[in-house]
Image (tube, rainbow, N blue to C red):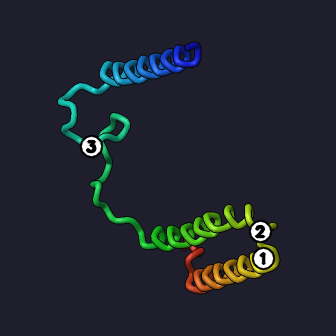
Amino acid sequence: MQTYLAVLALLGALGAAVAAVYALSVVLAPPGIVGTGPFLSGMRPQEHALSRYHVRWYVVTMVFLAFDMEMVFMYPWAVIVASVGAKAVVEMFLFLGLLVVGVVYAWREGAFRWT
């Protein structure tokens, strides 16, 4: 019964905290009709929501995704590499080699140049 009481007390405190945050946002909200404009920390946006980004940001995003996928595959690999053995090490180096080829290609195409 003690654990249920502790869980209920925690849920009550959580509910009170959420209610306090909502009440604070209502009190501190800028004047006007709620929900009529985009939300940007209470300030008006400086540009249109569908404004264009420079093309270099797309290239940076693709390079980031390549390194992100590397980490997604390396964490589970690190857990099982000892049980699988040399085959897992060879496969990971092949995967890293493929990523290096992608980075060299991006470098050659000028993805890392900002001018």
**In the image, which disc is placed on residue 81?**
2
Q: CA distance from mark 3 to mark 2?
A: 48 Å
Q: Residues within 10 Å of mark 1 (few under 14, many from 20)?
A: some
At label 3, the amino acid type is Pro
Q: Which quadrant of the structure image shows residue 84? A: bottom right
Tell me whether circle 1 and circle 2 mark residues in contact (CB < 8 Å): yes
| Residue at point 18%, 30% (across, down) | 33
Given residues 87 and 54, the one toward you in this image is 87
N-term mark: 1 or 2: 2
x, y (%) of residue 39? Answer: 31, 40
x, y (%) of residue 85? Answer: 81, 74
Q: Which residue is mark 3?
A: 38
Q: CA distance from mark 3 to mark 1?
A: 50 Å
x, y (%) of residue 72? Answer: 61, 64
Q: Quadrant of the C terminus?
A: bottom right
Q: Which quadrant of the structure image shows residue 35? A: top left
* Tally of marks: 3
Q: Is residue 76 left or right of residue 69?
A: right
| Residue at point 67%, 79% (across, down) | 95
Q: Which residue is mark 1?
A: 89
At label 1, the amino acid type is Val
Q: Secondary structure at mark 2?
A: helix
Q: Secondary structure at mark 3?
A: loop
